[in-house]
Amino acid sequence: MNTTQVLEKSSQSVNQHDYDVVIMGAGFAGICQARHLMLNIPNIKVALVDFRPEERAVKDMKIGESMVEVAALFICKELGLHEYMIENHTPKAGLNFHWPKQAESTDQLDDYYHVWSNRQTAIASFHMNRSKFERDVLAMNKEMGVEFYNGRVVDVDLTEGDRLKTIKVKLGEETLELSAKHVVDAAGRNFIIGNKTDNVITDPNKLYGLNTGSAWVRVKNIDRTLFDQGYAPDRATSSSYYATNHFFGQGHWLWMIPTDRESMELSIGIIHHHDVIPTQSINTQEKFYAFLKANHKILHNLVESGEDIDFHYRPKVAYKSKEMFSPDNWYVIGDAAYIFDAFYSYGTTTIAFAIEGVTEIVRAKLAGEADAETKRSAYNKFNLAYAENVNHLIRFHDKQLGHASVMSWRVYFEYMWWFGVHVPMYVGKWHLNLTFVNKFLKLMPANMKGLFVDVYDQFNQIVDRGGNIGLMDAYRADQLIGDYSPLNHFDHFLENAQLEPLRCNVFAGMKHAYFFIALWYVKFQWKGFGLQGVLNPRHIYHFFRLLNLSFQAVIGEKIYRSKTKHLPKNTDTERMRLEFHQYRYQPVWQSGSK
């Protein structure tokens, strides 16, 4: 729709300027928020505003081309886009991690230590071609009834409380005013709401010292065999190339993501810590390629084998928001809210949690529910706490990324929390349950500021002394006791399709996660610091606290089972079972002819 058509349409009726929700920004977060609102709130009126044309330019790219389990469930299940993703985007075979054995020799995979994803993930995941995804889902949203304004937001009046907000949009030479009950800022680093409310924190001292930049390039028609011949019968049951591959070195890590199968397109980028690698050494394509050649020749050979599409450099990556969901009915999500690092492909996951919170707040407020503000407050605190969690996951990366032994232990440790707590929490929609959220908010700060800080400090000690505590492979099941591996899940939410709200018993996952984290912690102390580490009073405290949390989760698991003993694991399956009582075999067939 061109500017003239928009203005003609908007002038037909004043009501066409009034919306329940106006979303500023039609990138990944904005279009997903719009679709989620349309799917979950009948008759809601939603507008999207973005200055970029609907037919996104090839070079309209940014960090964030990958997703993991939570984001994949959100996109495929909650947004109903599973078939679309299979048909239009590349599959993702987990995460791989690679460290050079010798800094001067990085020509081939044999020159690296590895933690390989050795199977297809239990929850299928994907890489994205962002421009294609955003273009296609925007078109789907318009078909659903979302109004799209191809203009630039020039101002927003963030009135107090439930009073209508006004959004001024520049369409060509004209200015249009939209009014809305709720306003969502999904416009990324434009910080439309962030700048207006002084809501953005960029000081590294308030980000646990995180001070990073990023360069990335996309190339097409690469020679994939320069990375891997594809024949590894003893290594894995999944593709190494179609994983998200992480390459490590001092003060940096690189991603390698295949974003298009037909054009053999790759995204290769770096997160670098300024204290180790200064901006001037990496901020142009020529310098970036020289860095690859000197430090990761295998990646340099890949990009040189193809055709350049584009190059980007971002001197500052990390920031966060003071508030995400305001009592004044404004919300910041996606890159408008926070980003710390692309590590673990966490960005789309944080967006999924935020979007579902926004939708439930908007739904409750539009319906006039008595606990709407309670939900707003709880979900705001939860998402801010989740941001702190992600910030901690990057803490001290500047010192540790290049240490293969320490980082393998760190990945294992962080995987235990992800698969044992965060994934089942999302699957069961526990992040929307007020009772659970309030309890979780009490646990998370204690974990982040206590156990995590101590573990990461000890990692630093091992790095400083040049220690080697061996390898912990996050995909193997022979490193603690029994057949445990971090990828295990302990409630059969997949086998029994327990994907409806609160059907997944998150407490079962937490019970096992805390127990095995306690065992990991003792092993870590023994390997890293010997008997002195094991018997240190503070370490004994952490060990027994983890066991206590495991015991508390046992109680939670039993209470959950008691409350849900008559609740079917899956309502569709239960309905099918009831229907089957009427089944009678009919030994006839229809010819179809007339």
Image (cartoon, grey):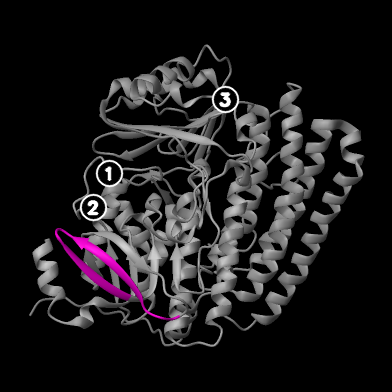
Q: Which residues are magenta?
A: 162-179
Given contact means CB atoms under 8 Å apart, are the residues at marks 2 and 1 in contact?
Answer: yes
Checking the image for residue 60, the label placed there is 1
In front: mark 2 or mark 1? 2
Task: Check if residue 177 falls in the magenta segment.
Answer: yes
Secondary structure, mark 1, is loop
Q: What kind of residue is marked 3?
A: Val
CA gap, disc 1 to disc 3? 30 Å
Amino acid on which the number 1 mark rests in the picture: Asp
Image coordinates for residue 454, horizontal then vertical, percent: 77, 42
Provide the residue designation for mark 2.
52
Q: Quadrant of the C terminus?
A: bottom left
Tell me the residue at 20%/55% (across/down): 54
How far separated are the C-alphas under marks 3 and 2?
36 Å
Q: Kindly identify which numbered label has been placed on residue 276.
A: 3
Of callouts 2 and 1, which one flags the residue occurring earlier in the amino acid sequence?
A: 2
**Mark 2: which secondary structure?**
loop
If you read the primary sequence from the N terminus, does the residue marked by circle 3 or circle 2 appear first? Answer: 2
What's under tag 2, amino acid-wise?
A: Arg
**Sequence-first disc among 1 and 3:** 1
**In the depicted view, which residue is nearer to us: 77 or 276?**
276
